[in-house]
Protein backbone atom coordinates (compact mmCIF):
# COMPACT_ATOMS: atom_id res chain seq x y z
CA UNK A 1 0.00 0.00 0.00
CA UNK A 2 2.83 2.39 0.90
CA UNK A 3 4.58 1.62 -2.39
CA UNK A 4 1.38 2.43 -4.29
CA UNK A 5 1.24 5.72 -2.40
CA UNK A 6 4.77 6.54 -3.54
CA UNK A 7 3.98 5.63 -7.15
CA UNK A 8 0.86 7.83 -7.08
CA UNK A 9 2.88 10.73 -5.64
CA UNK A 10 5.58 10.66 -8.31
CA UNK A 11 3.08 10.26 -11.16
CA UNK A 12 0.91 13.15 -9.96
CA UNK A 13 3.98 15.27 -9.22
CA UNK A 14 5.45 14.59 -12.67
CA UNK A 15 2.19 15.46 -14.40
CA UNK A 16 1.88 18.70 -12.41
CA UNK A 17 5.47 19.68 -13.21
CA UNK A 18 4.97 18.75 -16.86
CA UNK A 19 1.88 20.99 -16.95
CA UNK A 20 3.84 24.07 -15.85
CA UNK A 21 5.85 24.14 -19.09
CA UNK A 22 2.88 24.65 -21.45
CA UNK A 23 1.34 27.12 -18.98
CA UNK A 24 4.51 29.22 -18.99
CA UNK A 25 4.76 28.92 -22.78
CA UNK A 26 1.23 30.29 -23.14
CA UNK A 27 2.04 33.26 -20.87
CA UNK A 28 5.21 34.10 -22.79
CA UNK A 29 3.46 33.82 -26.17
CA UNK A 30 0.22 35.63 -25.35
CA UNK A 31 1.25 38.35 -22.91
CA UNK A 32 4.10 40.82 -22.44
CA UNK A 33 5.18 39.14 -19.21
CA UNK A 34 8.97 38.71 -19.14
CA UNK A 35 10.91 35.66 -18.01
CA UNK A 36 12.31 37.53 -14.98
CA UNK A 37 8.90 38.79 -13.82
CA UNK A 38 7.22 35.42 -14.22
CA UNK A 39 9.98 33.55 -12.40
CA UNK A 40 10.14 36.11 -9.59
CA UNK A 41 6.42 35.82 -8.86
CA UNK A 42 6.31 32.07 -9.32
CA UNK A 43 9.35 31.22 -7.20
CA UNK A 44 8.57 33.61 -4.36
CA UNK A 45 5.02 32.25 -4.11
CA UNK A 46 6.10 28.60 -4.41
CA UNK A 47 9.00 28.91 -1.98
CA UNK A 48 6.95 30.86 0.55
CA UNK A 49 4.18 28.24 0.47
CA UNK A 50 6.72 25.47 1.12
CA UNK A 51 8.41 27.34 4.00
CA UNK A 52 5.09 28.29 5.62
CA UNK A 53 3.91 24.67 5.50
CA UNK A 54 7.20 23.53 7.04
CA UNK A 55 6.94 26.19 9.77
CA UNK A 56 3.39 25.08 10.60
CA UNK A 57 4.78 21.55 10.93
CA UNK A 58 7.35 22.98 13.39
CA UNK A 59 10.31 22.30 11.11
CA UNK A 60 13.31 24.52 12.06
CA UNK A 61 13.50 26.36 8.73
CA UNK A 62 15.99 29.01 9.96
CA UNK A 63 18.57 26.47 11.20
CA UNK A 64 20.47 26.62 7.89
CA UNK A 65 21.32 30.31 8.47
CA UNK A 66 22.96 29.67 11.85
CA UNK A 67 26.09 28.08 10.39
CA UNK A 68 28.13 29.97 7.81
CA UNK A 69 29.21 26.82 5.95
CA UNK A 70 25.66 25.60 5.26
CA UNK A 71 24.38 29.12 4.59
CA UNK A 72 27.09 29.60 1.95
CA UNK A 73 26.19 26.27 0.36
CA UNK A 74 22.54 27.30 0.25
CA UNK A 75 23.36 30.61 -1.45
CA UNK A 76 25.54 28.86 -4.07
CA UNK A 77 22.80 26.30 -4.71
CA UNK A 78 20.20 29.07 -5.02
CA UNK A 79 22.32 31.16 -7.42
CA UNK A 80 23.61 28.43 -9.73
CA UNK A 81 21.30 25.47 -9.15
CA UNK A 82 17.81 26.85 -8.58
CA UNK A 83 18.17 30.18 -10.42
CA UNK A 84 20.21 28.65 -13.25
CA UNK A 85 17.84 25.72 -13.77
CA UNK A 86 14.69 27.85 -13.67
CA UNK A 87 16.07 30.54 -15.99
CA UNK A 88 17.50 28.17 -18.61
CA UNK A 89 14.29 26.09 -18.56
CA UNK A 90 12.05 29.09 -19.23
CA UNK A 91 14.44 30.62 -21.78
CA UNK A 92 14.47 27.30 -23.65
CA UNK A 93 10.66 27.39 -23.65
CA UNK A 94 10.72 31.00 -24.86
CA UNK A 95 12.94 30.25 -27.88
CA UNK A 96 11.43 26.82 -28.69
CA UNK A 97 8.51 25.23 -26.81
CA UNK A 98 7.63 23.37 -23.63
CA UNK A 99 8.09 19.91 -25.20
CA UNK A 100 11.65 20.61 -26.37
CA UNK A 101 12.59 22.27 -23.06
CA UNK A 102 11.19 19.41 -20.98
CA UNK A 103 13.12 16.83 -23.00
CA UNK A 104 16.39 18.80 -23.18
CA UNK A 105 16.57 18.86 -19.40
CA UNK A 106 17.09 15.10 -19.60
CA UNK A 107 20.58 15.78 -20.94
CA UNK A 108 21.46 16.14 -17.24
CA UNK A 109 22.10 12.40 -16.63
CA UNK A 110 24.61 12.43 -19.50
CA UNK A 111 26.50 15.37 -18.00
CA UNK A 112 26.42 13.69 -14.58
CA UNK A 113 27.88 10.47 -16.04
CA UNK A 114 30.65 12.44 -17.80
CA UNK A 115 31.41 14.38 -14.59
CA UNK A 116 31.61 11.21 -12.50
CA UNK A 117 33.87 9.57 -15.10
CA UNK A 118 36.26 12.56 -14.94
CA UNK A 119 36.25 12.67 -11.13
CA UNK A 120 36.88 8.93 -10.78
CA UNK A 121 39.20 8.83 -13.83
CA UNK A 122 37.31 5.85 -15.11
CA UNK A 123 35.25 5.30 -18.24
CA UNK A 124 31.50 4.77 -17.70
CA UNK A 125 30.27 1.16 -17.95
CA UNK A 126 29.10 -0.14 -21.31
CA UNK A 127 25.43 0.12 -20.30
CA UNK A 128 25.78 3.88 -19.73
CA UNK A 129 27.52 4.34 -23.09
CA UNK A 130 24.55 2.63 -24.74
CA UNK A 131 22.15 4.88 -22.80
CA UNK A 132 24.03 8.04 -23.80
CA UNK A 133 24.18 7.12 -27.50
CA UNK A 134 20.50 6.15 -27.55
CA UNK A 135 19.42 9.35 -25.78
CA UNK A 136 21.48 11.54 -28.12
CA UNK A 137 20.12 9.75 -31.18
CA UNK A 138 16.57 10.33 -29.93
CA UNK A 139 17.46 13.99 -29.37
CA UNK A 140 18.82 14.21 -32.91
CA UNK A 141 15.50 12.93 -34.31
CA UNK A 142 13.55 15.34 -32.11
CA UNK A 143 15.58 18.33 -33.29
CA UNK A 144 15.86 17.42 -36.99
CA UNK A 145 12.94 15.07 -37.76
CA UNK A 146 15.55 12.76 -39.28
CA UNK A 147 16.98 15.20 -41.82
CA UNK A 148 20.66 16.04 -42.23
CA UNK A 149 20.14 19.54 -43.59
CA UNK A 150 18.01 21.47 -41.09
CA UNK A 151 17.15 21.88 -37.44
CA UNK A 152 13.48 22.09 -36.45
CA UNK A 153 14.49 24.28 -33.52
CA UNK A 154 16.84 27.27 -33.49
CA UNK A 155 20.51 27.05 -32.56
CA UNK A 156 19.65 29.44 -29.73
CA UNK A 157 17.20 26.88 -28.33
CA UNK A 158 19.86 24.17 -28.59
CA UNK A 159 22.41 26.31 -26.73
CA UNK A 160 19.92 27.15 -23.97
CA UNK A 161 19.00 23.46 -23.81
CA UNK A 162 22.63 22.46 -23.23
CA UNK A 163 22.88 25.01 -20.42
CA UNK A 164 19.60 23.64 -19.07
CA UNK A 165 21.07 20.15 -18.91
CA UNK A 166 24.24 21.46 -17.22
CA UNK A 167 22.38 23.46 -14.58
CA UNK A 168 20.05 20.53 -13.92
CA UNK A 169 23.11 18.33 -13.38
CA UNK A 170 24.55 20.88 -10.93
CA UNK A 171 21.15 21.17 -9.24
CA UNK A 172 21.15 17.39 -8.77
CA UNK A 173 24.74 16.86 -7.62
CA UNK A 174 25.77 19.93 -5.64
CA UNK A 175 23.28 20.08 -2.74
CA UNK A 176 23.44 16.40 -1.73
CA UNK A 177 25.25 16.99 1.60
CA UNK A 178 23.36 20.21 2.25
CA UNK A 179 20.00 18.48 1.82
CA UNK A 180 21.07 15.55 3.99
CA UNK A 181 22.12 17.91 6.78
CA UNK A 182 19.28 20.45 6.64
CA UNK A 183 16.41 18.71 4.87
CA UNK A 184 15.49 18.48 1.20
CA UNK A 185 12.22 20.42 1.26
CA UNK A 186 13.67 23.19 3.45
CA UNK A 187 16.52 23.74 0.98
CA UNK A 188 14.13 23.72 -1.99
CA UNK A 189 11.89 26.28 -0.26
CA UNK A 190 14.75 28.65 0.56
CA UNK A 191 16.29 28.14 -2.88
CA UNK A 192 13.04 29.21 -4.51
CA UNK A 193 12.64 32.29 -2.32
CA UNK A 194 16.26 33.43 -2.75
CA UNK A 195 16.30 32.93 -6.52
CA UNK A 196 12.84 34.53 -6.79
CA UNK A 197 14.08 37.64 -4.96
CA UNK A 198 17.09 37.81 -7.30
CA UNK A 199 14.80 37.61 -10.33
CA UNK A 200 12.66 40.35 -8.76
CA UNK A 201 15.74 42.61 -8.49
CA UNK A 202 16.89 41.73 -12.03
CA UNK A 203 13.48 42.65 -13.42
CA UNK A 204 12.84 45.55 -11.01
CA UNK A 205 9.35 44.11 -10.74
CA UNK A 206 8.20 46.66 -8.14
CA UNK A 207 8.06 49.29 -10.93
CA UNK A 208 7.06 46.91 -13.72
CA UNK A 209 4.02 47.51 -15.94
CA UNK A 210 3.50 43.73 -15.89
CA UNK A 211 1.46 43.95 -12.68
CA UNK A 212 -1.35 45.43 -14.78
CA UNK A 213 -1.38 42.24 -16.84
CA UNK A 214 -1.92 40.22 -13.68
CA UNK A 215 -4.92 42.40 -12.86
CA UNK A 216 -6.78 40.16 -15.30
CA UNK A 217 -8.38 37.39 -13.23
CA UNK A 218 -7.43 34.80 -15.87
CA UNK A 219 -3.77 35.80 -15.59
CA UNK A 220 -3.89 35.67 -11.79
CA UNK A 221 -5.34 32.16 -11.87
CA UNK A 222 -2.75 31.02 -14.41
CA UNK A 223 0.16 32.44 -12.41
CA UNK A 224 -1.17 30.89 -9.21
CA UNK A 225 -1.63 27.62 -11.08
CA UNK A 226 1.99 27.68 -12.28
CA UNK A 227 3.23 28.47 -8.77
CA UNK A 228 1.13 25.90 -6.93
CA UNK A 229 1.66 23.16 -9.53
CA UNK A 230 5.41 23.71 -9.27
CA UNK A 231 5.61 23.68 -5.46
CA UNK A 232 3.21 20.73 -5.15
CA UNK A 233 5.19 18.77 -7.75
CA UNK A 234 8.44 19.32 -5.82
CA UNK A 235 6.93 18.18 -2.54
CA UNK A 236 5.27 15.09 -4.06
CA UNK A 237 8.45 14.16 -5.90
CA UNK A 238 10.55 14.34 -2.74
CA UNK A 239 7.94 12.62 -0.53
CA UNK A 240 7.73 9.72 -2.99
CA UNK A 241 11.33 8.82 -2.15
CA UNK A 242 10.13 7.62 1.26
CA UNK A 243 8.09 4.86 -0.37
CA UNK A 244 9.84 3.91 -3.64
CA UNK A 245 13.44 3.69 -4.83
CA UNK A 246 15.24 6.54 -6.65
CA UNK A 247 15.38 4.33 -9.77
CA UNK A 248 11.59 3.88 -9.72
CA UNK A 249 11.21 7.62 -9.17
CA UNK A 250 13.41 8.37 -12.19
CA UNK A 251 11.45 5.97 -14.37
CA UNK A 252 8.02 7.26 -13.33
CA UNK A 253 9.14 10.87 -13.76
CA UNK A 254 8.95 10.18 -17.51
CA UNK A 255 5.29 11.16 -17.08
CA UNK A 256 6.58 14.76 -17.01
CA UNK A 257 7.50 15.06 -20.71
CA UNK A 258 4.44 13.00 -21.65
CA UNK A 259 2.21 15.45 -19.77
CA UNK A 260 3.97 18.44 -21.37
CA UNK A 261 3.57 16.89 -24.82
CA UNK A 262 -0.11 15.98 -24.35
CA UNK A 263 -1.05 19.42 -22.99
CA UNK A 264 0.99 21.22 -25.66
CA UNK A 265 -0.69 19.29 -28.47
CA UNK A 266 -4.22 19.61 -27.07
CA UNK A 267 -4.10 23.15 -25.66
CA UNK A 268 -1.37 24.96 -27.62
CA UNK A 269 -1.83 23.15 -30.93
CA UNK A 270 1.77 21.93 -31.06
CA UNK A 271 2.56 19.76 -34.08
CA UNK A 272 5.06 16.91 -33.89
CA UNK A 273 6.24 15.15 -37.04
CA UNK A 274 6.71 11.40 -37.37
CA UNK A 275 10.44 11.17 -36.69
CA UNK A 276 10.22 13.71 -33.89
CA UNK A 277 7.74 11.41 -32.15
CA UNK A 278 10.10 8.49 -32.70
CA UNK A 279 12.88 10.59 -31.18
CA UNK A 280 10.77 11.39 -28.11
CA UNK A 281 9.99 7.71 -27.59
CA UNK A 282 13.68 6.78 -27.96
CA UNK A 283 14.76 9.49 -25.51
CA UNK A 284 12.28 8.29 -22.90
CA UNK A 285 13.31 4.64 -23.37
CA UNK A 286 17.02 5.38 -23.03
CA UNK A 287 16.54 7.85 -20.14
CA UNK A 288 14.76 5.04 -18.28
CA UNK A 289 17.54 2.66 -19.33
CA UNK A 290 20.15 5.06 -17.92
CA UNK A 291 18.21 5.28 -14.65
CA UNK A 292 17.99 1.49 -14.34
CA UNK A 293 21.62 0.85 -15.26
CA UNK A 294 22.80 3.64 -12.93
CA UNK A 295 20.76 2.18 -10.06
CA UNK A 296 22.07 -1.33 -10.71
CA UNK A 297 25.68 -0.10 -10.84
CA UNK A 298 25.21 1.72 -7.52
CA UNK A 299 23.71 -1.39 -5.91
CA UNK A 300 26.63 -3.52 -7.13
CA UNK A 301 29.11 -0.93 -5.78
CA UNK A 302 27.35 -0.76 -2.40
CA UNK A 303 27.06 -4.54 -2.03
Image (cartoon, rainbow, N blue to C red):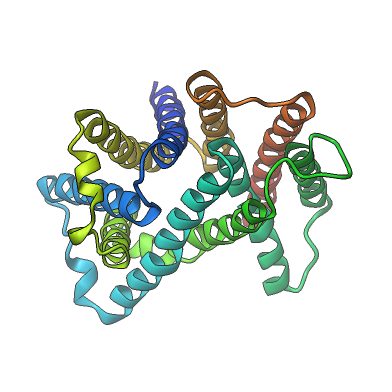
Residue extending furthest bottom? 68
Residue at 77% in and 39% down: 138
Q: Where is residue 266 in the image (x, y as percent from the top left)?
A: 52, 18
Tell me if residue 135 can be seen: yes
Up the image or down, 42 lies above or below 244; here it is below
Residue at 67% in and 34% down: 284
Q: In this view, does 190 lie to the left or right of 138?
A: left
Residue at 17% in and 44% down: 53
Q: Position of residue 39 (x, y in %)?
A: 34, 52
Q: In which quarter of the image is residue 131?
A: top right
How many marks on residues? 0
Q: In which quarter of the image is residue 29?
A: top left
Q: Position of residue 202 (x, y in %)?
A: 32, 67
Q: Is residue 79 left or right of residue 44?
A: right
Given residues 200 and 234, the one toward you in this image is 200
Given residues 263 and 270, the one toward you in this image is 270
Q: Which quadrant holds the N terminus?
A: top left
Given residues 253 and 302, the one toward you in this image is 253
Given residues 302 and 114, the one toward you in this image is 114
Up the image or down, 171 lies above or below 211; here it is below
Tell me if residue 243 can be seen: no
Amino acid sequence: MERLKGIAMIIIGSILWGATGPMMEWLLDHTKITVEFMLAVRLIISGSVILVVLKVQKTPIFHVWKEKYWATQLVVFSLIGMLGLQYTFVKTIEVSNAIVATLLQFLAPIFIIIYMAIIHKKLPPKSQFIGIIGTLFGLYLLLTNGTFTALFVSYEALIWGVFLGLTYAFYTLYPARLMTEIGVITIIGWGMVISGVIFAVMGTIWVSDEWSILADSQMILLMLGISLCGSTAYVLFLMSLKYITPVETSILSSFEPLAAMFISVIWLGAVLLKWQLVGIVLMLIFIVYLSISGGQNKEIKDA
